[in-house]
Amino acid sequence: MKRFQFPLETALKVRKLEAEVEEAKLLRLEREKAECRRSLDQLAATARQRPACLLTGEPVTRAQLEDMDRLGVFVKKERRRLSDLEGALLHKIATGRGQLRQAEQRVELLDRLKAKAKDGWRQEADKELQILAEESYNHQFQTREDSE
């Protein structure tokens, strides 16, 4: 009786590797999105902070007002950039999930084919064992008859 060999084993290994790569890509995108979200949250916290001169009631100089204005412009541009980046990442994540799902389905298909092939191999092996058992029984029976 020969050992079970799945003819598509190499293809199955490649498909599993592809699925792992897709999963790694998706995890990287998720980390990037989380980092983008943290940056947006930090930016929002920065925008909420008021300069010390406004809190203490001291007179505000023109330079301080210009600095606050530049900070406001920067925060606005950066918020828009980060929001756009987050949107692009969300789109890539959705695409990546679809690709991962497809890769997992390809692996599952080959796994099912392998299981089906193994079941067929087992049935053939069982038939071989049955034939061997019958031949052995017949041989023993024949040997007993000949000795009597």
Image (cartoon, grey):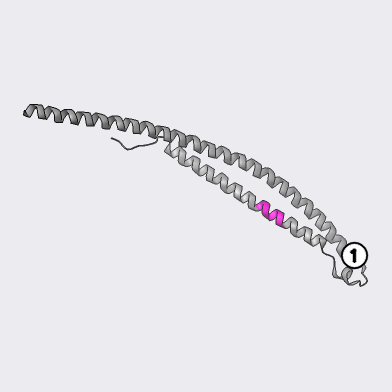
Identity of the residue drawn at 49% across and 42% down: 16
Identity of the residue drawn at 36% across and 37% down: 5
| Residue nearest the observer in this picture, 7 or 130 | 130
Q: Position of residue 29 (x, y in %)?
A: 64, 49
Is 137 left, or right, of 12 in this rendering?
A: left
Q: Is residue 116 magenta?
A: no
Is 29 left, or right, of 59 in this rendering?
A: left
Which image quadrant for residue 132? top left
Is 130 left, or right, of 62 in this rendering?
A: left
- Name above or below for residue 123 compared with residue 72: above
Q: Which quadrant of the rendered structure holds the C terminus? A: top left
Which image quadrant for residue 44? bottom right
Q: Residues within 10 Å of mark 1 (few under 14, many from 20)?
A: few
Q: Position of residue 112 (x, y in %)?
A: 46, 34
Identity of the residue drawn at 82% across and 54% down: 76
Identity of the residue drawn at 81% across and 57% down: 75
The main secondary structure of the magenta stretch is: helix
Q: Which quadrant of the rendered structure holds the N terminus? A: top left
Q: Which residues are magenta?
A: 32-38
Give the structural element (helix, strand or loop) at label 1. Answer: helix
Q: Position of residue 7 (x, y in %)?
A: 40, 34
- Name above or below for residue 27 compared with residue 128: below
The number of numbered badges drawn on the structure is: 1
Q: Position of residue 124 (x, y in %)?
A: 32, 30
Residue under label 1, please give it: 65
- Name above or below for residue 139 compared with residue 50: above
Q: Which amino acid, by three-letter code, is at mark 1? A: Leu
Residue furthest front in the image = 148
Q: Is residue 36 magenta?
A: yes
